[in-house]
Amino acid sequence: MADTGESGEHVDDVEAVTRAVLTASRLLVAVSARSLAAVEDRVTLPQLRLLVMLSMHGPAKLVVLAERLGVNPSTAMRMLDRLIAVGLAERRTNPANRRETVLRLTHEGRVLVEDVTSRRRREVETIVARMAPDRRAALIDALTAFNEAGGEPAVPAADGAMYPLGWTDAPLPQGG
């Protein structure tokens, strides 16, 4: 097991916890980067983020996607134009309002998101499997508390439900 440089007596020290979370974050960023490497010749990280939003929330109007991504509609449109050109997204008439256009994933776009997601999940499972059972149980409690404090929704169970790559549109809780 790697030495974190922290002893058990620092468990209530905000700085020690922050360092431990940042160390874990560095590992998770590396895991995510490796899962993205297989598709980096096809999409950029911001484009993948847009695909994930479509995967998580389903078809959406451009203005809604831009808002969820925190970008200008023109920026979202440029990303979408590139994704449409390579067959990962498409424009469709909104069946609820024929005057509107919605954007959605193609089958190929969904497969790409699922591929990246499953690569990341497998690597995380490999890391977690190396931990002792009591450490895994403690990690569940700690990460659940951390996710709740950060406003991150829970991930679906591994029963075939897709595990989104993050970037929810939920606001970060204020105060504390």
Image (cartoon, helix red, strand yellow):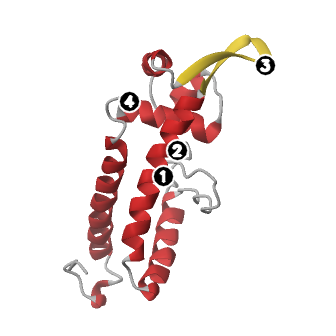
Q: Which mark is residue 43?
A: 4
Q: Is residue 148 above or below residue 79?
A: below
Q: Closer to the N terminus: mark 4 or mark 2?
A: 4
| Residue 24 shows in the view | yes
Q: CA distance from mark 2 to mark 3?
A: 26 Å
Q: CA distance from mark 4 to mark 2?
A: 14 Å
Q: Secondary structure at mark 4?
A: loop
Q: Closer to the N terminus: mark 4 or mark 1?
A: 4
Q: Say which amino acid is labelled 2.
A: Glu
Give the left or right position of residue 19, taking residue 132 as reference: left
- Expressed as whole percent of the image width and height from the top left, the position of residue 20 reads 29, 71
Q: Is residue 138 above or below residue 30?
A: below
How many residues crowd mark 1 within 10 Å: few (<14), some (14–19), many (20+)?
some
Picture residue at 48% right of the left edge, 52% below the top:
118
Q: Say which amino acid is labelled 1.
A: Ser
Q: CA distance from mark 3 to mark 4?
A: 29 Å
Residue beneath disc 1: 118
Give the left or right position of residue 20, taking residue 153 as reference: left
Q: Closer to the N terminus: mark 3 or mark 4?
A: 4
Residue beneath disc 2: 114
Residue beneath disc 3: 95
- The answer to whether the residues at label 1 and label 2 have Cβ atoms under 8 Å apart is yes
Q: Say which amino acid is labelled 3.
A: Pro
Compare residues 83 and 12 and report the one nearer the observer: 83
Q: Secondary structure at mark 2?
A: helix
